[in-house]
Amino acid sequence: MKQVVQNYKSGELAVLDVPVPGCKPGGVLVRSAYSLISTGTELMKVSEAGMSMLGKARSRPDQVAKVMQSVATNGVPATYRKVMGKLDSYTPLGYSLCGVVEEVGAGVDDVKVGDLVACAGNEHALHAELNWVPKNLYAPVPDGLAPQHAAFGTVGSIAMQGVRQGEPQLGEVALVIGLGLIGQLVVQLLAASGVRVVGVDPDPVRCELAERLGAAACGDPDSAAVEAAVAELTGGHGVDQVYLAAGGGSNQPVELAARLCRDRGRVVDIGKCRLDLPWNAYYEKELDVRFSRSYGPGRYDPEYELEGRDYPIGYVRWTERRNLACFLDLAARGKVDVEPLISHVADFDDAVETYQSLKDGDLKAITALFRYPEQAVEAESPAVAVPTVNVKPSPARAARTPVRLAFVGAGNYATSMLLPHLTQREGVELSTVVTTTALSAANAQRKFGFAEATTDLDAVLGDKSIDAVFVVTRHSSHAELTRKALLAGKTVFVEKPLALTEDELAGVLAAVEESGNDRLQVGFNRRFAPLLQEARQRFGARTGPASLRYLVNAGTLAHGSWYLQQGTEGSRFAGEGGHFIDTASWLLDADPVSVYAVAPSGNEDLQIVLRYPDGSTAAISYVTTGAPGFPKETLDLVADGKVLRLDDFVRASVYGRKKWVSSRLPKARDKGQNAELAAFIKAVRTGGPMPVPLESLVATTAATLAVQAGLAGGAPVTLARA
């Protein structure tokens, strides 16, 4: 097998072929899927190895003291040979990884071959294709947590142990000094604990990231903004805790901690920074200085780590293994988000080049990961079921006018993009608006002329005079409200997404089957856009496979947007990605059969490839890091010697034997909402077919769900027809 090693004497880094470790009792043999490169601890070790002997001595005075003791005991010649022999040997790198159990040792009964586990330890979670890991240094990975995210388990445990040492309480304010990998995790853990956080780092990019991940304010240690934020959040008293997550030789962190901490506050050292405590400042405030020892209780205890002797939970609640399992659980439930911390993913074979780029500063990263060959991950390809629609529709009702509508929800999209079109349409009566707060219902009633405003959903669903219900609420409620409205016999228009999980989608279709009511439309409006409709008509039929490219320059969300509440409302792409998948499938006149998704930049940017039955492909680039001035949506469709081009619903063109270019739209972009509503109202009024077949709505929803499954599994997801 291959392993990353370093010669501490020469500084040489190499990927060596070494024997496969044996699977000893009390542990498991793990084949690595991803291992984490600590850009703090590991790079410090790599940099030290490149120093002169004097430089090495200056950087490790603790080791110099051991050498001097050896000289006094064994003499200079013997000590020299011992030290040179140790320096001129290969040493391992790495201490945090995720992999698949390949063999189970005697005495282990909590995992089996094929299970995904997160592993810890600078002797057992190395950058190597295979590692033997003792029982107390691994934890099973919860369902749904991607292996690249589970590889953060060890550093997450380090951050968690530091937070535990600070004993945070609800409503307190904390200062985190140093917003590298550990600092970013500490910020999120504190925010999840109900603590308001101020971050400190000289790097503005790290400050911005910490604010995005939950910090109330961040800034440079020399700026007045940090002190002002602390004063405002604490009423001038100072923070309750300070977490030192910085490195380096400056004494500024401990001095800043003393200045901004309240009387009898707590200062926790997690990183490895200079600790010349200013006596007067710490004495006068009687500050409580605490140290956080790595992953938690059990660390450096060979009986715990190597022999598997656990500490009784009644005496030691949080051991290093329990911290590891706890962090994985938080990550799996979306309470901690490590995806934005991944700056680079490198193939394991490129390990030496990656370390060199990090050391030289060519690669700037909070975290980098090594990705191991694909056989390291379970071979079975993930799949998302596309449920079959089994329904005998109830007889269509007779045509009638006016069509009476009810709205459930009256937020920004409903009031800006839907209701203005409906108030101008003949044969439509806005009957009732339902909201959770009385005032918002009253506002919608006054502005758009609803006959009634209420907070009673059941009364609306029971009103037989209402023909159709619009569900325009937050994403997490769409599936359940749609299900109730279908069972009540209503025609339903639900804004995207239809569902956030496979279970929610199955629940909607169960309501269709139970009621015989398949009168459903999802707000995929782009296929109704007049400009795109005309471009598709001019492109004409095709005979061969097509290639489609769709760039969505989504941009960043405003701070506080409920779209950021991924724990309850799903990911941003889960909420709006169906728009783009539906548009691609409509242009290709088919439903996708597989989805492959990657997040190459370590943020919300996604690259998605959809494959279709005839060999056509659609590549959707969903990016949040683009320039705000660039068009939001651009699309190219290529097939049979022809090209269709759409420029942000402002201009379209088709290149073939003849060239067609639309005139630039004189008014605001028309993305199809008005035409979509016209088609929906016609279907409700006449009892005719719904504008989009239910099978297509289901396929698009399943494909959108498959994107998240693909990110978690790191492999193409088959869309299996159930």
Image: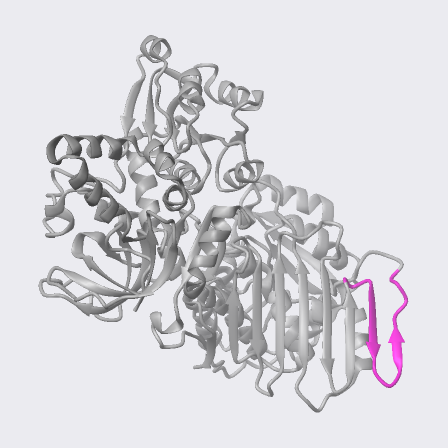
Tally the numbered discs: 0
Q: Position of residue 27 (x, y in %)?
A: 16, 60
Q: Please tell me which residue is depicted at 33% across the width and 47% down the height of the picture.
A: 9
Q: Please tell me which residue is depicted at 57% across the width and 75% down the height of the picture.
A: 610
Query: Looking at the image, is 169 positioned above or below residue 338?
Result: above
Is residue 652 in the magenta section? yes
Please state, as top left, top right, bottom left or bottom right, where the N terminus lies in the image: bottom left
Near-viewer residue (171 or 365) = 365
Q: Position of residue 240 (x, y in %)?
A: 37, 22
Q: Please tell me which residue is depicted at 54% across the width and 65% down the height of the picture.
A: 498
- Is any atom of residue 28 visible in this view? yes
Is residue 415 in the magenta section? no
Q: Position of residue 221 (x, y in %)?
A: 51, 25
- Name the image quarter holding residue 664: bottom right
Please state, as top left, top right, bottom left or bottom right, where the C terminus lies in the image: bottom left
Near-viewer residue (344 or 535) = 344
- Name the image quarter holding residue 253: top left
Q: Which residues are magenta?
A: 648-665
Near-viewer residue (196 or 251) = 251
Q: Is residue 301 left or right of residue 574?
A: left
